């Protein structure tokens, strides 16, 4: 079997892909168990796969403080959000077992330190709000009071909901290399893809070799469209409207933090680890409610010096069908007014789909609308 070199792809963050998978230790039964929340378990799995390279475990105080304060690790590498494990008290031993909420052992952690943290400060700096109506802040404020840091070794990976879409960074990199792609744009989504997002992924694809459609399949808010319905929508859209040899659909296993601008940076860095040289940042990326300005998630990229992140953000403004242009367009490329544009609010679209009405083809592909209508009927 020939091994395809991935040398022509963008390097992982920090230079090499971390692999923190390993063997189940013999002394597992004797170790103190630390129970992870589902968000922590998804972070753990992303550390194992190298999606969070260069992190090899849950963050120590020095990295945590620097990340919260100025979006860098102690090493000087950019990093936008804490990846921490909250506990009630410091463990006694040097090694603990990490178990999921069902009690299944996933990993061991070599205890480096246990430290206290300031929830208000983390919320203010990372989420730009301390309002507990914000789902990320609510999660933070409900956390246990100390952070436990240390390198992990993961011997049990979660059963993916979509095994055929579960690909670690090493695998997406191998696929990109096999297809001869060097420049790859990543697209993050947690919604069905309608015409507006189809348009911007295609505009981006015109300038690079390949497109990674990388929907988030980890934990989201309960009012987001269920993940199995979304995956149906993605498959339907891609098979009908994208060339198969230019697109890869794969699952991004992260849990949403809803940290808006900082999460956009974090998402871009993760996609760099998956092999993306470019990353699409649209309006209100990873936002929730009206906590963030429409373009805050683009503006935050200016807080890094040029090329510091390496992965190149591709910014998009509001896109829509314009009846006068007779095409998809954006506020950047179309001079016409709102009266010429096909615009439907999220509320209006949900109402139409709930009634079994197919929205206009200028808004969504009918095949995608039908998947959603079927889902609403159940
Ligand atoms: Zn126009």
Image: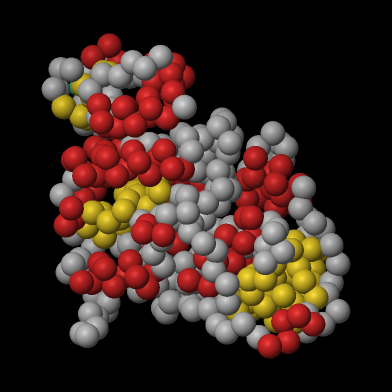
Residue 102 higher or lower than 57, as above or below = above
From the top left corner, tell me how far across and down residue 16 is, in percent.
42, 79
From the top left corner, tell me how far across and down residue 213 is, in percent.
32, 51
The structure's colour scheme is: secondary structure
- The answer to whether residue 129 is left or right of residue 182 is right
Pick the front one: 323 or 40:
40
Taking the image in four quarters, ligand 1 sits in the one at: top left
Residue 268 higher or lower than 107, as above or below = above
Marker count (numbered): 0
- The answer to whether residue 272 is left or right of residue 107 is left
Q: Residue at x 58, y 77 (%)?
A: 155
Residue 281 higher or lower than 104, as above or below = above
- The answer to whether residue 125 is left or right of residue 20 is right
Pick the front one: 176 or 161:
161
From the top left corner, tell me how far across and down residue 346 is, in percent.
43, 23
From the top left corner, tell me how far across and down residue 193 is, in percent.
33, 37
Judge whether residue 307 can be spotted in this image: no
Q: Residue at x 32, y 62 (%)?
A: 276
Q: Image quarter for residue 40?
A: bottom right
Please identify the quadrant where the N terminus is shown: bottom left
- The answer to whether residue 32 is left or right of residue 281 is right
């Amino acid at each position: 079997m020939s091994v395809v070199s991935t040398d022509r792809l963008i390097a992982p963050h920090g230079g090499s892909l971390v692999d923190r998978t390993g063997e189940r230790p013999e002394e597992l039964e004797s170790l103190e168990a630390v129970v992870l929340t589902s968000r922590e378990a998804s972070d753990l799995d992303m550390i194992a796969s190298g999606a969070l390279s260069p992190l090899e475990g849950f963050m120590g105080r020095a990295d945590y403080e620097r990340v919260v304060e100025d979006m860098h690790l102690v090493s000087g590498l950019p990093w936008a959000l804490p990846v921490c494990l909250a506990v009630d008290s410091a463990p006694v031993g040097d090694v603990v077992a990490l178990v999921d909420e069902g009690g299944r052992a996933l990993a061991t952690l070599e205890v480096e330190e246990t430290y206290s943290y300031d929830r208000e400060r983390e919320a203010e700096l990372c989420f730009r709000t301390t309002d507990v109506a914000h789902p990320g802040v609510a999660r933070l404020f409900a956390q246990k009071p100390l952070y436990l840091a240390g390198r992990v070794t993961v011997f049990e990976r979660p059963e993916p909901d979509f095994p055929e879409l579960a690909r670690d960074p090493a695998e997406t990199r191998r696929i990109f290399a096999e297809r001869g792609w060097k420049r790859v744009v990543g697209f993050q989504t947690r919604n069905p893809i309608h015409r507006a997002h189809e348009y911007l992924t295609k505009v981006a694809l015109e300038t690079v070799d390949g497109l990674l459609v990388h929907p988030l399949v980890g934990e989201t808010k309960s009012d987001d469209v269920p993940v199995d319905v979304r995956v149906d929508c993605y498959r339907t859209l891609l098979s009908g409207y994208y060339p198969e040899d230019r697109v890869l659909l794969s699952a991004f296993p992260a849990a949403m933090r809803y940290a808006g601008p900082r999460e956009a940076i974090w998402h871009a860095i993760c996609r760099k680890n998956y092999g993306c040289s470019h990353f699409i940042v649209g309006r209100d990326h990873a936002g929730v409610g009206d906590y963030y300005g429409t373009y805050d998630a683009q503006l935050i990229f200016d807080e890094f010096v040029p090329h510091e992140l390496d992965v190149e953000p591709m910014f998009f403004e509001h896109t829509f069908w314009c009846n006068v242009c007779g095409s998809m367009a954006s506020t950047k490329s179309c001079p016409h007014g709102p009266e010429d544009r096909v615009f439907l609010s999220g509320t209006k679209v949900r109402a139409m789909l709930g009634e079994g009405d197919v929205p206009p083809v200028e808004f969504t592909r009918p095949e995608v609308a039908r998947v959603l209508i079927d889902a609403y009927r159940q």
